[in-house]
Structure formats: C-alpha cells, structure tokens
Amino acid sequence: MSLDTMTSSGTSSDQILGIQEPRIGTWPDGDEAIGQVAVRWFRDFGLTYFPWQNFTQTKMLRGGVRGAKWSAPTVCIVCTRQQGKSWVLVGRMLFGLFQLPWERTIIFTAHLFATAREIFRDVLGIIDSHPELKSRVKRVTTGAGHEGIELKDGSRIRFLARSKDSARGWQADLIVCDEAYAMTADEVAALRPTTTQSVNPQFIYASSAGMDSSDVLRSLREKGIEGSPGLAYFEWSAEDDAQNDDLDAIRQANPSLGYSNQTLDDVLTDLQDLAEDRYRRERLGIWSPIAAENAVPAGAWESCRDREWPESVQLSRVAIGVDVPPDRSSATVAVAGVREGESGVSVELFQQAEGTDWVAPVLRELLDARGRVPVLVDGSSAAAALETDFRAHRVRAQFLSTRVYAQACGAFFDAVVNGRLKHRGQRDLDRAVGVAGQSMKGAGLWVWKRPDTTHNIAPLCASTLAVHGCLNRRDSGQKSSGKRRAVVL
C-alpha cells in the first residue's frame, strides 16, 4: 500500500502501527519459561516492552531451564534506528546480572565509546531507581573507558568500546555487541574466546542494517536466513525492492511505529530530509549493496600484462604463495620473483588443481629444485589447515597474521596501480582479479573479498602472498632459473 492510497482512504497517521514480527526470523526450538520470566521481571519494575521486544526477549531466551544450555548461544537482532533495540539489550543484561546465577560476568561493547557510556547510564539509572536492586550493588566504576557495576555476590558488568584487544584476558558468560554493523573479524576474535569457560554462554549482536563493509554482520544474516543451528536471528526490514513511500514496507521496518512517540509523520519527514540511500538504510532497514567496483582497476591490471612472457627466466628473491578457498575444493600455488636486470616483481600461477592433498608434495618438489624459498600462507584462511601436511613433507611455511596479510594485499594493489608488477595473463588469475572486492579490517587495512560463494579468488590470494614474500626477502642475491609450468584448467 502506498502513502497516496493511505491518504485517500482517510487513515490517520497515529493509527499506523509497526509490524511486530520480524520479516526475517529464525530461532531454535526450546522452552520459553525463562524468557517469559524475564519479560515479567522487567515489567515488575514498571519498565514496559512493546510486543516486538517481548517477542524477541522470549525467543532468544529459549532453553536454559534446569541446567540446560540456551537453545541459541548466538543471537542477532537487526532493526532500524530508534526502535528500542537497546532496551532489549538493557533488559537482557539486567536480568542476567540479577536473576541468572551462572552469568557472573557480562560484557557490553559498542563501536563508539559514547554508545557504551550511554547504555551504562541507562542500566545504572534503572538500578538507582529501584532500592531492591541498588541494595545489591557493591561498587560502581565511572572512570572514562572503565565503566562497570559489581554486585555484592561478585557478579559484574563492564561497558567497553570495541577494539581488536577488547576484553582480552577476561572470562565472560554474556557478551553483548551493539553497533554490530561495524564489527571486524579481529574484534570478534578478541571477544569470542572470553566465553569458552562459561557453563552456559550467550553472544548477542545488535545492529541497524548492514553496510557494504559489514562482513561479520552479513555472515550472521546469511546463517540466519539458512536457519543455522544455535542462532536466533531477528530482522525488521523492508524488501530490497520496496518503494520509499510504501506503507507496508515502513510498518515492517519500524516495529515501534505507533507504539512509541514515533509516528508516520516522523518517517515522512526523514523521507524528505535524508539522502535516498540513507533513508532506505535507516528507515526501511534495507542493507547497503556490496560495491560492484572491482578492488583492482581493470585498466591497471591490463597494463601490467607482459605479452612477451619468456618460456624461461632467471629470478631472484623467489617466493611461493599458497591459498585454498573456504570450501577446500581446490588449491592454488603461485610463484613470484624479480627478473635479472629489473626492479619490478613478476608473478605467475605455478599450479592449480582440485583437492588439497597434492599441495605439500608439489611444494617439496619445488623446494628441492629451487633451494630455500619462503612459502607464505594466510594464517586465517582455509590453507592454514595444511600445516600438518607441510610438516610431514618438511615444508616450512610462514603463516601470516590478518594484519600482515592485509598489508600484503595493500602492497599488491600498489604494485599493480604503480606498474611495478608483471603477469602473463593467466585466465584464472585474471578472473579472480576481476571479481575481488575489499573487506575492511580496521585502521585502513583490508583484505581481498569474494563477491559470493560462486567465485574463487584463491589465485589472487596466492599471488598476493608470493609477491609479499618476494618484496620482503633479504637474500636478494639468490637466483634460480628454469622453465615454469603454466596452469591449464
């Protein structure tokens, strides 16, 4: 229904109510007794939830009865701004802090320190307003960046701004991550291990619709749509092709519409005042599309093609890169080096084939022929699982951290756009370069990203590792020669 249709029918804007159930919602089965207790407990303090908030709280607290685990150890809530997501998080944390004896440590994190501080004030304000809660508090810490509340029984809650070192050294039973659209893989890696010792942990993500760079949140969404076991996923959003003034789309994306002070007129004002892409994301909950632009400019890549690539060439500073796609269906080995009399780097796919069992034997053969040559692997990729095979074949590989691999991706990009790289125009490498995007890893660093599961960018990743190894070799005097194999698929 469009707004024109609504207006002509004489419907009042204050009668427009948001849709309470999520457009995309999957959650495991389980007993809802604890969730219902949580909703009643919150209501007992005079703090009301809208129906959609009750719905979410009840579903995400399934299980946990009589020593059982939560049905959903991972929860993700995606909703447009100013609907009350934070109120769901505040209620969940208070209930855990005061009512669940096994949740001894709770950590709340946000992308911005200001958000973490605001939630801290909300939680503390509720506690201070209710003597029965305040009487159980032992200590409140208010120092900037160190906000926290500790109860007399030792239970505690901390409020942090996220970083790649957030909560390292802590043990937690409940982790709550607001503004999850900005989460990076490094931040998840810093937080996830804190719950490994918990008897019944839960990890909650909350966010508005994802941006192009929201890789962590986008992965959760994909799992939620699939109904992944152990994940409760709730998303209030309009269809991607919804019209900006479609009334049903507005109601579906704004569940608190008409229940709170928020009215249809507020939405219409934003439609007039916001840029269209911002309105669709902030008000309709429509995710930003993944950028279609290739990370590597096509013209620059083409200008690096060496159309007179020799059949044999002498190389110094030789290095090898290995990569495996996430589905482990194949593997790629690339070689890079510096030609005699030149300063740029030449890179070539040495071998690509199905499976991964062949990689270590081929590397051993290659090393026997070329002498001591560095072998590089992205330590966070599927290729890292080859470490046992490497040891069995006496292949010493360097497993790069995410940060160093991101630096390698940047150096490869610079070498291409500055004309300091040569390649021979191999089909699979060209295809990988043509589809690869960028996945931000924080602080201006990024790594190559596949547009979807149908594309294989392992040839580009392996080449990037080889080029990085070449550029960072110290034994520049070593040379090797001989005819190298081309990849034919």
Image (tube, rainbow, N blue to C red):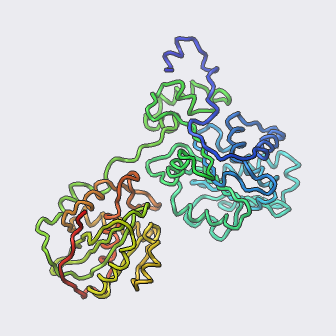
Horizontal side of 120 relative to 240 (left or right) equals right
Residue 105 or residue 13, whichever sits in front: 105
Q: Position of residue 9 (x, y in %)?
A: 55, 11
Residue located farthest toward the left when viewing the structure as drawn: 308
Q: Position of residue 232 (x, y in %)?
A: 63, 47
Q: Position of residue 272 (x, y in %)?
A: 47, 27
Residue at x 60%, y 48% (from the top left corner): 76
Determine whether 135 is above or below 473 in the image: above
Determine whether 36 is above or below 407 in the image: above
Q: Position of residue 98 (x, y in %)?
A: 81, 53
Q: Name the quadrant of the C terminus.
A: bottom left
Residue at x 69%, y 43% (from the top left corner): 59
Residue 9 or residue 260, whichever sits in front: 9
Determine whether 95 is above or below 12 in the image: below
Residue at x 52%, y 43% (from the top left corner): 209
Residue at x 43%, y 61% (from the top left corner): 326
Q: How many marks?
A: 0
Horizontal side of 326 relative to 343 (left or right) equals right
Horizontal side of 266 relative to 333 (left or right) equals right
